[in-house]
Amino acid sequence: MLTDAQVIALEKAKTEKEAHGEFESEHPGYCGAQDTFYVGNLKGVGRVYQQTFIDTYTKVACAKLYDRQDTHHGGRSFERPRAAVLRQP
């Protein structure tokens, strides 16, 4: 059971988080964050790019490496992820 002061403190913290762009996802798959960035240059391969997707509810991240930066990969790249899954504690 929470006291009135605790409830007020929790509501205040939630409002502050929302003001900084944070929010609570309703369930896994509800919302995710995706980004592509340049990793580096590998001899024999050339430029390497990493595409990352993070589920905002479960905090599970998937990453894939590509030899070209192509928007064609963007929407389909995590339909059937074969990359390593990382979980933060």
Image (spheres, rainbow, N blue to C red):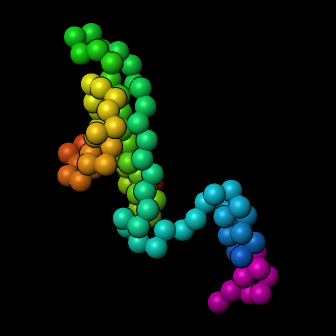
The spot of residue 72 in percent (x, y) is 28, 39
Q: Which residue is rendered at x = 75% and y = 72% of the image?
A: 12
Give the percent coordinates (x, y) of residue 57: 44, 64
Decide: is 47 above or below 65: above
Q: Residue furthest right?
A: 5
Mainly helix, strand or loop, the magenta region? helix
* Vertical position of residue 71 compared to residue 7: above or below: above
Q: Which image quadrant is residue 20 in?
A: bottom right
Picture residue at 71% right of the left edge, 76% below the top: 11
Q: Is residue 42 magenta?
A: no
Where's residue 27, x and y in %?
Answer: 41, 72
The answer to which of 61 and 89 lies nearer the viewer is: 61
Foreground residue among 72 and 6 = 72
As rendered, which of 75 and 47 lies closer to the eye? 75
Q: Position of residue 42 (x, y in %)?
A: 30, 14
Q: Is residue 3 left or right of residue 71?
A: right
Residue placed farthest to the top in the image? 43
In the image, the segment drawn in magenta is 1-9
Q: Residue at x 27, y 30 (%)?
A: 66
Q: Is residue 6 magenta?
A: yes
Question: Residue, x 74% and y 87% (percent of image)?
Answer: 3
